[in-house]
Amino acid sequence: MQFPFHKFGLIFRLVEEGDAEFILSLRTDKAHARHLSPTDNDLQKQTEWIREYKKREEKQQEFYFLFANEDNEPVGVVRVYDIKDDTYTNGSWIVKPGCDEFISIKSDLFLSEFAASHLKNKRCLFDVRKNNKKALRFHKMFAQIIGEDELNYYFTIDEEAAKRKNEFLTSII
């Protein structure tokens, strides 16, 4: 998969240090980032985090994507990490306030395509905060809950379930 990658009316690329301010604006927006791990409102720390991430990206251990609209305006980010022999995790998913709901679906479809081509359809593991009712409804349609703690439900989705999800999502966009 070559970047930037154009699909579904969005442009996907790997995060760069220059994206730190945009990412920080998303992750420190109290309303939209309430289901993510807290982030210090410190541009220097965010830039350093991205610098360290780029080392993991180079080793194919992690991928952090920024997606932009057709005007190349950044609208969101999502990350693939904890890549192991047969699993990976996606998360750190956040979309700019005011964006249309289909952007989340389109970015999910992109992740599936990336997983199929680059990660060879490994099983996806991810967590969803229990109070993130909208995301829980969505993920329960396709993924299986494999555990929980006080804060999260833990899900898995295998290749077959991912294909069913992609067919459904593609039909509605």
Image (tube, grey):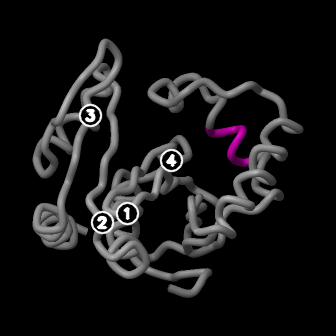
From this view, report whether residue 6 is shown above or below residue 170. below
**Which is more N-terminal, label 2 or label 3?**
2
Q: Nearer the viewer, mark 1 or mark 3?
A: 1
- Do tag 2 and tag 1 residues touch (Cβ < 8 Å)? yes
| Secondary structure found at label 3 | strand
128 sits to left or right of 68: left
Q: Which residues are magenta?
A: 22-26
- Do tag 1 and tag 3 residues touch (Cβ < 8 Å)? no
Q: Rate crowding at label 2 as few (under 14), some (14 to 19) or many (20 or more) other CA atoms within 10 Å.
A: some
**Which is more N-terminal, label 4 or label 2?**
4
**Which is more N-terminal, label 3 or label 4?**
4
Place of residue 34 in the rendered image (x, y in percent of width and height, measured from the top left): 49, 24
Residue 154 placement: quadrant: top left
Which label was assigned to residue 95?
A: 4
Mark 2–mark 4 Cα distance, whole angstroms, equals 25 Å
| Secondary structure found at label 4 | strand
What amino acid does circle 1 point to?
Answer: Asp
Place of residue 53 in the rendered image (x, y in percent of width and height, measured from the top left): 70, 54
Furthest residue toward bottom:
2
151 sits to left or right of 134: right
